[in-house]
Image (cartoon, grey):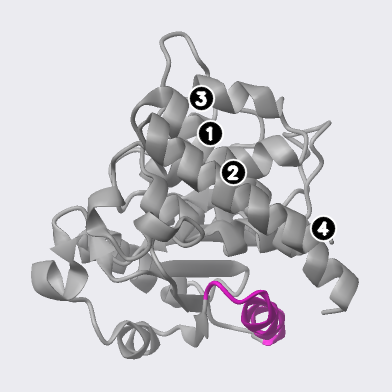
Amino acid sequence: MNSQLKKELEIFANQIRMGIIESTYNAKAGHPGGSLSAAEVFAYLYGKEMRYNPSEPKWENRDRFVLSKGHCAPGLYSALAYKGFFPVEDLKTLRHIDSYLQGHPNMNTVPGVDMSTGSLGQGVSAAAGMAKGAKYLNKDVNVYTLLGDGEIEEGQVWEAFMFAAQYKLDNLCVIIDSNGLQIDGACEDVMSAEPIDEKLKAFGFEVCVVNGNSLDELDSAFEKFHGVSGKPFAIVMKTVKGLGVSYMENEVGWHGKAPNDEEYKIAMDELNAKMKELEA
């Protein structure tokens, strides 16, 4: 990846983080921690990897993205807003009555959302179905889905993984945000899914383990995805929950809590300082 593109993606990831804080603060609710940990992959997907058209959100030949860990909608909404699917200012309406930006993405109301997110674990099944449909129709379409490491404790996830391998869905890229924390505490204490990479390999996936907050490592992983044939691909991202906001980093309490006035100011001051550094 050239230095100019990397800088653009770093700025985009920081914008996404600012949108996450802005939206959850104004909602007085939401899930900042797991949204912040995924900022780089949102930036990479929408800044380099995926084919889409904000002026034609339902373009038939677009790549698809399914947010399986749907409570991290603030991250997806921020990426979509900064790429022109809807006004950035609307991020402040997150979870408000009559807002189209609700706590989980709704494909019927939000431009750029390819699948509504229901209970955790369901998104990857929808993504696998989309990938199978694209194969059936001989469409050159890739499908990407983002799950959490707490989410993959759901049994339905592994059924979907079996389906993906059975039908050789090499147009499916499963991304797991392994930040080590879920709502009740550390994943290893609640219900460990480790070793995630070895289990995915046993389920028939080609697997790549990366630092999910490194754009260079993400770039290498997605290049590998494009080189795989005959099997689905998985990227296990080791990330820091709450990354980018000092007091949220690796703190399980920020899984599903919005910042108050003082916390909002601290977060935005840090992110604005980061933006000045990136734009210098």
Residue placed most toward the observer, 153 or 277: 277
Secondary structure state at the residue bearing disc 3: loop
**Residue 101 appears in the picture as rendered:** yes
Quadrant occupied by the C terminus: bottom right
For the residues carrying marks 3 and 2, which lies nearer the camera in this image? 2
Judged from the image, the secondary structure of the residue bearing numbered disc 1 is: helix
Point 85% across, 68% down: residue = 5
Residue 194's x, y, as percent?
Answer: 24, 83
Label 1, label 4: how far apart the Cα atoms are: 20 Å
Q: Secondary structure at mark 4?
A: helix
Question: Which dot, 4 or 3, sits closer to the camera?
Answer: 4
Instruction: Relative to 94, say whether 240 is above or below.
Output: below
From the viewer's perspective, is the residue at label 2 or at label 4 nearer?
4
Separation (CA) of disc 1 from disc 2? 6 Å
Query: Could one spot residue 138 in this view of the protein?
Result: no
195 left or right, relative to 163: left
Residue topped by disc 3? 101
Q: Residue 279, labelled with which disc?
A: 4
The residue at which mark 1 appears reads as 22
**Which three-letter amino acid code belongs to the residue tagged 3?**
Leu
Q: Is residue 100 left or right of residue 202?
A: right
